[in-house]
Amino acid sequence: MASTPAEQERSQKPLSLPPFSPRFYDLVRLTSGLLLHTVFRIRATGLENVPAEGGVVLAPMHRSYVDSLAVGVPLRSRRFRAMAKYELFLVPVIGRLIALGGGFPVRRAVQDMEAYEAALTMLRNGQMLLVFPEGTRNRDGSARPQLGAARLAIESGAALIPVSIGGSDRIKLLPPRFPRIRVFYGEPIPVGDLPADDLRRASHAATKRWSAAIEAGLATMSR
């Protein structure tokens, strides 16, 4: 979709990252963990596949608003940062809380290179970044994965970890339905054999491997 001149101008402005509070992040993880363990009886496997250090792109499937919490709660030894749509940071209180919890803004209507460069810097500095390849909630699984997560991993040299999530798509408030949530962290997706001189082609291939890894993870959890 073509951007307007005003949007193009905004996308050129330097991105000032909001303050991140590790203590607040840990508090959210603790309180979310109580909810996920008691109400949704969360079970996580494959944690050994997540590198203990170095840059990591966590790339989960996305079916529910609780997915980011479900992915983060079991990772007790590491914290992640996450891209969130710019508009959320304009909402009083909500935007501040998202920022304190590690979120930073990305403008989705334009090619937001400032946010992309910020993400690359985080990964190259050994941080963990949560990126949903499907871009937004994909309740029926029909949305086509985007290339951003794979591209970030390839360009930064970070590990690309597929994360399969089961049960979150069946959550309902009315009538109440609180299914068990299962999370499977897959092995890092290999990208070393992909064409180094064609980043877009390599990202396409890595994204296809991500889709296959997600399906394999769901199959593993169903056994």
Image: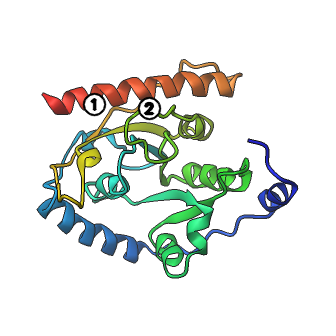
Crowding near pointer 1: few (<14 within 10 Å), some, many (20+)?
many
Please provide percent x and percent y for residue 92.
54, 81
Amino acid beneath label 1: Gly
Q: How many numbered discs sit on the rendered protein? A: 2
> Front-most of 72 and 105?
105
In this view, the residue farthest toward the front is: 175
Residue at 44% of width from left, 32% of height from top? 142
- Residue that badge 2 annotates: 142
Q: Please state the horizontal and vertical placement of residue 178, each as a whole percent of the image.
A: 17, 55
Residue 194 position, x and y percent, is 57, 19
For the residue pair 76 and 73, the one nearer the viewer reads as 73
Specify the label residue 31 is tagged with.
none
Q: Amino acid at mark 2?
A: Ser
Q: Quadrant of residue 152?
A: top right
- Quarter of the picture containing the N terminus is top right
* N-term-proximal mark, 1 vs 2: 2
Q: Which residue is mark 1?
A: 217
Nearer the observer, 155 or 207: 207
Residue 126 in view of the camera? yes
Indicate the secondary structure of the residue bearing disc 1: helix
| Residue farthest along the right direction in this orientation | 5
* Residue 191 appears in the picture as rendered: no
Q: Secondary structure at mark 2?
A: loop
Residue 175 falls left or right of residue 5: left
**Foreground: 104 or 127?**
104
For the residues marked 1 and 2, what is the alpha-carbon distance in whole angstroms? Answer: 18 Å
